[in-house]
Amino acid sequence: MEYEAARLALAGLALAPAAIHDARSRSVPVWWLGMGWAAACMFAMYDVAWGGMEWWPGGAAAALGVVCGGLLVAASRYVMLGAADGHIMAVSCMMLPWHGGVPLALYGIAAGCAAALAWMAALNVWYNLRDMAGGRAVPLRDLFVCHRKRPGERFVVGAARRGPVHMDDSGIVRDAAGDLFEPAGAEGSRVRPVAPMASFVVSGVLAVSVYVMVLSPMVE
């Protein structure tokens, strides 16, 4: 139990900065990517040299996560996806690959992505229902996918924006049309919320890991 708790604590400390930064700015700093990969490699070396991890199934789960993360990084060059999200997926799978017959990071990533999609859909539905209650027409096709922008919303993009996206030297997330996010003071245009995917992924990975590694043995 002490080993599992220590591993979770170290993984949480390594992943938390990316999650917090993403929640605040919808981006992950470059400095974290290097530190995250360094920490992940240390976890992997420990598992191979002293942790007794075998190629199957733990090593395969970690490798699958790295491949999926790499594919997401490659896809970010062509579509509106954050490259950092792919790095975080890969790093998470190297830190928390397998325990007790469960691919921790893979399950956690799936849970985090599902939660992010549910959050964005719920936010759109909430705003659209408020508009409908106020007498504004809302196309049915927009109910779950976009809404009318409110003043103060910072992390939303125009419904027509498609990417790809990148971060410039000043840390601003952009696409071919310029600054990706709509101005906070703007209102009325149809926009889509941008989920802090890194935050959702990290939360999902840590939640699944805590349940499987700590809570489940206590219940049994």
Image: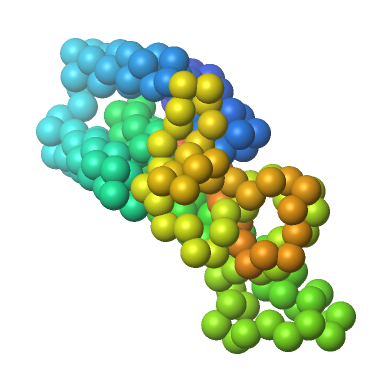
Furthest residue toward right: 134
Which percent across, then down, holds residue 47? 25, 20
Relative to residue 42, is residue 151 drawn left or right?
right
**Where 55 sits versus 193, above or below?**
above
**Where 14 sits versus 157, above or below?**
above
Which percent across, then down, holds residue 5? 50, 24
**Where 131 sits versus 83, above or below?**
below
Q: Examine the rendering and report whether any part of residue 12 can be seen.
A: no
Of 41 and 172, nearer the camera is 172
Q: Residue at x 62, y 85 (%)?
A: 139
Relative to residue 147, is residue 65 drawn left or right?
left
Q: Residue at x 33, y 20 (%)?
A: 37
Relative to residue 193, is residue 148 drawn left or right?
right
Which percent across, then down, holds residue 147? 66, 68
Q: Quadrant of residue 87?
A: top left
Of 10 and 137, nearer the camera is 137
Of 192 and 44, nearer the camera is 192
Q: Residue at x 19, y 13 (%)?
A: 49
